[in-house]
Image (tube, helix red, strand yellow):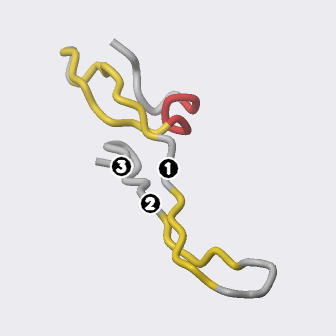
Amino acid sequence: MAKCAICEKGAHFGNAVSHSHRRTNKMWKSNIKSVKVKVNGAAKRMYVCTSCLRSGNVERA
């Protein structure tokens, strides 16, 4: 679910490194919102990241 329907932006994975340099797995989730969007003139609910919403890649219904 945590993937943008427009730009396919998803979660990123890496390591959280403590002060003693111990490494544990870390996950950065993208800021995804459930939004009503106009698709071919009809309203449809999609998961869209906030960067696509702000840049105007989608039009809200």
In primary-sequence order, the first of circles 1 and 3 is 3
Q: Residue at x 50, y 71 (%)?
A: 13
Q: Residue at x 18, y 15 (%)?
A: 42
Name the disc covering residue 30, or none.
Answer: 1
Residue 25 in percent (x, y) is at 52, 76
The residue pinned by badge 3 equals 2
Q: Is residue 9 above or below residue 59?
A: below
Residue 58 in percent (x, y) is at 41, 28
In primary-sequence order, the first of circles 2 and 1 is 2
CB-based contact (under 8 Å), mark 3 and mark 2:
yes
Residue 20 appears in which quarter of the rendering?
bottom right
Q: Secondary structure at mark 2?
A: loop
Q: Is residue 19 above or below residue 58?
A: below
1 on left or right of 14: left
Q: Secondary structure at mark 3?
A: loop
Q: Nearer the viewer, residue 50 or 60?
A: 50
Q: Secondary structure at mark 1?
A: loop
CB-based contact (under 8 Å), mark 2 and mark 1:
yes
Residue 33 appears in which quarter of the rendering?
top left
Q: Nearer the viewer, residue 52 or 19?
A: 19
Task: Spot the residue most to the right.
Answer: 19
8 on left or right of 40: right
User: For the residue marked with disc 1, what is the amino acid?
Assistant: Ser
Q: Dot 2, how many residues are within 10 Å of its Cα: few (below 14), some (14-19), or many (20+)?
A: few
Q: Residue at x 44, y 60 (%)?
A: 11
CB-based contact (under 8 Å), mark 1 and mark 3:
yes
Name the disc covering residue 11, or none.
Answer: 2
User: For the residue marked with disc 3, what is the amino acid?
Assistant: Ala
